[in-house]
Amino acid sequence: QKEVEQDPGPLSVPEGAIVSLNCTYSNSAFQYFMWYRQYSRKGPELLMYTYSSGNKEDGRFTAQVDKSSKYISLFIRDSQPSDSATYLCAMSRSGTYKYIFGTGTRLKVLA
Amino acid sequence: DTGVSQDPRHKITKRGQNVTFRCDPISEHNRLYWYRQTLGQGPEFLTYFQNEAQLEKSRLLSDRFSAERPKGSFSTLEIQRTEQGDSAMYLCASSLSEIGELFFGEGSRLTVL
């Protein structure tokens, strides 16, 4: 079993829809969570960084962490065709330097 | 723009040749990471520097791979005797604090023929 699981998609939604992207993880020690957006042949772009549980909102993006369920989510409101990309989750714990990444979910927002 | 800079963006080489990638982190960031990403996969951790000290290396980093960060500024990743399995995107990232926000460069894509 991988430490971080992410549905590869593709996930297709119409423009303006609310998108929900999710990751599950197995290591209960994870406390630091990030979401990235990656366009084809480009480096990952940091969208959200959260510590421990709870919600964080930034513009059209909301990140949620449910440590009891070992589940994190990224919501995108009013999705746009320019949001079409691969979304990666990443997480880490104290005492290590490395982040573990999910495989990414491909999102297509249809105009 | 003062983001993470990587060079070259794309390198095509023949099997058995040596290649070197360079990363210039965000100027005030003293933590630097190398990751490798293959098609359809998430980035995999290779190694981590705090200033000039290499503090952690993945088992993925075979003895053909070496990374340096002289003077705690830019970093290089060298792959000796390249193999076709080394074909991937090599990503550099930097951070200001331990387990802090990680900022990536655009990556160096390696194709080994």
Image (tube, helix red, strand yellow):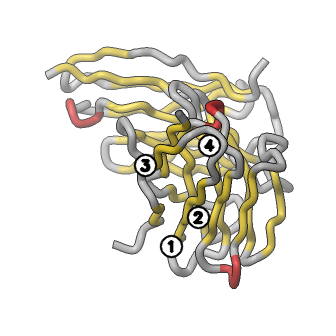
Is residue A64 visible in the rendered structure shown here?
no
Q: Where is residue B30 shown, x and y percent of the image?
A: 65, 76
Badge 1, how many Cα within 10 Å: few under 14, some, many 20+? many
Residue on which the image places disc 3: B10
In the picture, residue B56 is in which quadrant?
bottom right
Q: Earlier in the sequence, mark 3 or mark 4?
A: 3
The reply to whether the C-beta atoms of the residues labelled 2 and 1 are less than 8 Å apart is: yes
- The kind of residue tagged 1 is Ile
Residue kind at label 2, given as amino acid type:
Ser
Closer-to-camera residue (B71/B103): B71
What residue is shown with label 2? Answer: B94
Which residue lies most toward the left here?
A: A111
Circle 1 chain: B
Mark 3 or 2: in front is 3
Q: Is residue B113 above or below residue A48?
A: above
Kind of residue indicated by mark 3: His
- Chain designation of label 2: B
Parent chain of label 4: B
Give the residue at mark 4: B36
Mark closest to the chain's N terminus, 1 or 4: 1
Q: Say which residue label 1 marks.
A: B26
Secondary structure under tag 3 reads: strand
Mark 4 lies on a secondary structure that is: strand
Classify 10 Å Cα crowding around label 2: few (below 14), some (14-19), many (20 and above). Answer: many
Of the numbered discs 2 and 4, the one sitting upstream in the chain is 4
Residue at 81% x, 34% y is A28
**Alpha carbon of mark 3 to alpha carbon of mark 2: how far?**
20 Å
Query: How far is mark 1 from mark 4, CA to CA?
Result: 19 Å
Marks 3 & 1, CB-CB < 8 Å contact: no
CB atoms of marks 2 and 4 within 8 Å: no
Task: Give the label on residue B111, or none.
Answer: none
Check the picture and name the quadrant holding the N terminus of chain B. Answer: bottom left
